[in-house]
Image (cartoon, helix red, strand yellow):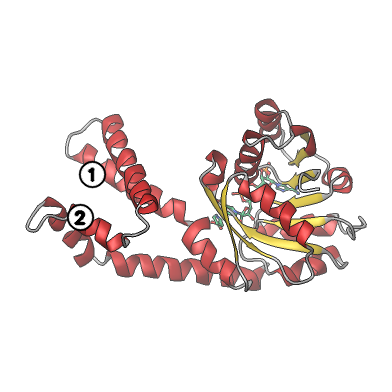
Amino acid sequence: MTQAKVCFIGAGNMTRSIISGLVTHGYPSDLIHATNPSKGKLDALQQDFAIEVSHDNHAAAKAAEVIVLSVKPQLMASVCEDLSSLDLADKLIITIAAGIPASRYPVYFNQPIKLIRTMPNTPTQIGYGMTGIYADDSISAEHKAICETLMQSGGKVVWVDKEAELDQVIALAGSSPAYFYLFIESMIASGVNMGMAEDKARLLAEQAALGAAQMVIQNQQLSVTELRQNVMSKGGTTARAVETLQQGGLVELVDQAMTNCVARAQEMAKTF
Ligand SMILES: NC(=O)C1=CN([C@@H]2O[C@H](COP(=O)(O)OP(=O)(O)OC[C@H]3O[C@@H](n4cnc5c(N)ncnc54)[C@H](OP(=O)(O)O)[C@@H]3O)[C@@H](O)[C@H]2O)C=CC1
Ligand SMILES: O=C(O)[C@@H]1CCC=N1
């Protein structure tokens, strides 16, 4: 049953991203249910993807074979506690929440459960997602296959052997689209400052970002450093720009940002 009846608890950004990937890749919409307290997001999901929606976490979880926990980490305990009267023995529970360790969930649910922890990202919405997955040895091959099917619909997946590696996945993939957006935003702002129309600046920046990513992907025989050096003519314009970024501390700043990202995940693990 790699196409199981799945319910998403919480119908926000990530649920929408995952469902979009699933439906686009032919996952039957009548096997997908999403719940949410407010109505707008549910209406939009129903309209766009013809899935089942409701406000009733309990009924949706009871009817599902797979429950995807997709609420903010600070709400996770109360959402799981509300479902703890259900018999979860035969269900697979997948969490996409940052920070919360796998060991916390059986405590929230007050029973042993079969849990897989994942860390996806929003490009899942358009098939370019990257999801890290962790399961301990108690999880069956069938449940791992179900989880992989769900997450692969939105892009690539990578299994990690140690749960702690999921925090590195957050820094490298879960959170990282935002770093690239910030870089593109900054480029557009600079283009506009130099007098270019915003739509034209956006087109130039977004196509350069897409081209650079594709060059990295399609030239695995080259290091990323070589690809960069191929743009940098000696004494030319790129060298001046890249030196400016390096002298301004970009490399150290990225390292600091990713270290702080992991630290925040570890902090959240103690909080929720
Ligand atoms: N955004 C991202 O890039 C990524 C997020 N994640 C993880 O995904 C999870 C969800 O994040 P994201 O989608 O961004 O957050 P959102 O705030 O967009 O979505 C969370 C949803 O949960 C709903 N909700 C609140 N209370 C309940 C409840 N009691 N029962 C059911 N649903 C409820 C909210 O509804 P309402 O708005 O109506 O209150 C909201 O629609 C988080 O745990 C986050 O760590 C993981 C990877 C990437
Ligand atoms: O910012 C967050 O906490 C979530 C986890 C990864 C992306 N968004």
Q: Residue furthest left?
A: 235
Q: Residue at x 79, y 33 (%)?
A: 30
Residue 251, quarter of picture: bottom left
Q: Quadrant of the C terminus?
A: bottom right
Residue 119, quarter of picture: bottom right
The answer to whether residue 61 shows anywhere in this view is: yes
| Residue 190 image label | 1
- Report the Cα–Cα distance between label 1 and label 2: 24 Å
| Secondary structure at numbered mark 1 | helix
Residue 189, quarter of picture: top left
Mark nearest the camera among 1 and 2 is 2
> Mark 2 highlights which residue?
230
Q: Mark 2 Cα within 10 Å, few/some/many (few <14, many 20+)?
A: few
Q: Residue at x 84, y 49 (%)?
A: 65
Rendered location of residue 104, percent (x, y): 75, 69
Q: Mark 1 Cα within 10 Å, few/some/many (few <14, many 20+)?
A: some
| Residue 9 image label | none
Instruction: Tell me the kind of residue under disc 1.
Output: Ser
Instruction: Tell me the kind of residue under disc 2.
Output: Asn
Q: 153 or 238, which lies in front? A: 153
Rendered location of residue 118, percent (x, y): 64, 59
Q: Residue at x 19, y 52 (%)?
A: 231
Rendered location of residue 212, percent (x, y): 32, 48
Q: Residue furthest front?
A: 221
Rendered location of residue 60, percent (x, y): 84, 43
The quadrant of the rendered image in which ligand 2 is seen is bottom right
Relative to 187, is 120 on the left or the right? right
Image position of 50 with respect to 119: above or below: above
The answer to whether the residue bearing label 1 lies less than 8 angstroms from the nearest atom of ligand 1 is: no
Image position of 160 with respect to 11: above or below: below
